[in-house]
Image (spheres, helix red, strand yellow):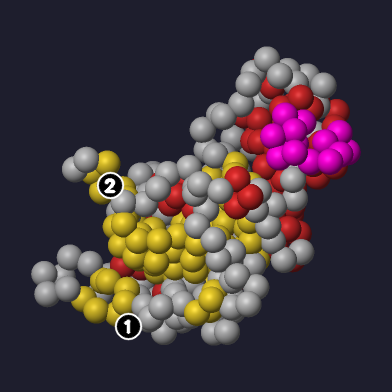
């Protein structure tokens, strides 16, 4: 995990080998209220809009988040982890909806909980359906504009709806929306007051491919405009499309922090299992087994070969080339071990 950290926190493995802990030096508050320091997730010299220091959250005997520290700078950052890892709890604490049991959280240099002026810096898209089904999409977004006491709520409402391309459906009750449409109108409501920080909890769930592309493009544009966008996801390949940096949460702990390529490189150095669909699996298997990058080959049904490789990038190059050279038709090639269990095992091994 050391080579995944983009800052230089000291790492210490506990004697019982239970977890790798992050020891960070205090962040320094700058004149604009942001912070600089050695928090995981921050590149050298970058200022943190969101600061999370030694934060834990427990509910009775259940520990949802355990001693997590990181910083989030302007741009798009992914909070990646399996379901139940603590992502939603972290986002709620950053949004000020839930208080930490220990540690501290700052947004633009201020605690996010308790002051209405601080809430106006934030926009939150929760995973849960926090909507009123009897309201139209326009009424729902306008309600948020009124709650934010915007001077021109109607104009702000129209602008936010246009950003998520929901103009044609804005006059319909939300109760009749598809899941993807509800996600988009929630994003519009979160953006209506033009917040400095946008928190999105699994925003791509339920969206069709076109909707996903458009929302990803919107998130990237917001990051380019200097907004701080923190997006939770449990899908590794999804994160690649929008995140500049990644925070990996496993069992309530920070497992890794860095850019996508660094984390992907770490994963690619491990043995991988790849499934190949082909019209001639036995002949393809005979060709592949002679290459040093292939550790094993087995058959999975009449048209599928499963290969284990110790060089996933070489394997991705040689399979199409060898199939072409031997006149073997390929119908598909994809990793067979990209489950989050496998991915996070790669990232957290010591």
Tell me what residue is drawn at x 63 percent, y 77 percent: 31
Main SS category, magenta section: helix
Residue 58's label in the rendered image is 2
Characterize the local packing of mark 1: few (<14), some (14-19) or many (20 or more) Cα atoms within 10 angstroms.
few
**Is residue 332 in the magenta section?**
no
The local secondary structure at tag 1 comes to: strand
241 left or right, relative to 193: left
Tell me what residue is drawn at x 50 percent, y 57 percent: 111
Q: Quadrant of the C terminus?
A: bottom left
Q: CA distance from mark 1 to mark 2?
A: 25 Å
Nearest the viewer among 298 and 64 is 64
Residue 73 location (% of width, % of height): 59, 69
Asked if residue 288 is positioned above or below residue 133 in the image, the reply reads below
Q: What residue does disc 1 label?
A: 10
Asked if residue 38 is positioned above or below residue 210 in the image, the reply reads below
Q: Quadrant of the N terminus?
A: bottom left
Furthest-left residue in this view: 16
Res. 154 image quadrant: top right
Nearest the viewer among 162 and 36 is 36
Residue 281 location (% of width, % of height): 45, 55
Characterize the local packing of mark 2: few (<14), some (14-19) or many (20 or more) Cα atoms within 10 angstroms.
some
Q: Earlier in the sequence, mark 1 or mark 2?
A: 1
Residue 67 location (% of width, % of height): 30, 62
> Do we see residue 302 in this rendering?
no
What span is in magenta? 141-155
The local secondary structure at tag 2 comes to: strand
Residue 237 location (% of width, % of height): 54, 57
138 left or right, relative to 314: right
Tell me what residue is drawn at x 59 percent, y 71 percent: 34
Nearest the viewer among 153 and 163 is 153
Nearest the viewer among 102 and 77 is 102
Counting labels gives 2
């Amino acid at each position: 995990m050391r080579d995944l950290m983009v800052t230089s926190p000291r790492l210490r493995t506990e004697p019982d080998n239970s977890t790798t802990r992050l020891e960070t030096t205090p962040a320094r508050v700058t004149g604009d209220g942001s912070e600089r320091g050695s928090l995981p997730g921050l590149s050298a010299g970058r200022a943190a809009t969101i600061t999370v220091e030694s934060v834990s959250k427990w509910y009775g005997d259940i520990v949802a988040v355990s001693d997590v520290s990181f910083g989030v700078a302007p741009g798009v950052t992914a909070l990646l982890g399996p379901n139940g890892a603590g992502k939603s709890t972290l986002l709620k604490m950053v949004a000020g909806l839930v208080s930490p049991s220990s540690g501290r959280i700052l947004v633009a240099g201020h605690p996010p909980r308790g002051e209405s002026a601080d809430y106006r810096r934030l926009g939150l898209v929760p995973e849960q359906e926090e909507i009123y089904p009897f309201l139209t999409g326009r009424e729902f977004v306008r309600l948020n504009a009124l709650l934010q006491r915007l001077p021109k709520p109607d104009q702000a409402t129209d602008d936010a709806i246009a950003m998520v391309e929901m103009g044609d459906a804005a006059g319909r009750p939300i109760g009749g929306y598809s899941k993807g449409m509800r996600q988009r109108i929630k994003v519009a409501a979160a953006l209506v007051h033009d917040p400095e920080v946008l928190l999105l909890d699994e925003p791509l769930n339920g969206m069709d491919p076109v909707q996903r592309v458009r929302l990803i493009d919107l998130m990237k544009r917001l990051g380019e405009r200097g907004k701080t966008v923190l997006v939770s996801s449990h899908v590794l390949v999804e994160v690649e499309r929008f995140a500049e940096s990644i925070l990996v949460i496993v069992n309530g702990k920070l497992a890794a922090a860095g850019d996508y390529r660094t984390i992907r490189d770490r994963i690619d150095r491990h043995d991988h299992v790849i499934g190949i669909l082909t019209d001639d699996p036995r002949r393809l298997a005979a060709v592949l087994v002679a290459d040093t990058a292939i550790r094993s080959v087995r058959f999975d049904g009449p048209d599928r070969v499963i290969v284990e490789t110790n060089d996933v990038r070489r394997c991705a190059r040689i399979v199409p080339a060898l199939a072409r050279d031997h006149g073997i038709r390929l119908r598909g090639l994809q990793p067979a071990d990209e489950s989050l269990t496998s991915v996070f095992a790669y990232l957290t091994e010591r």
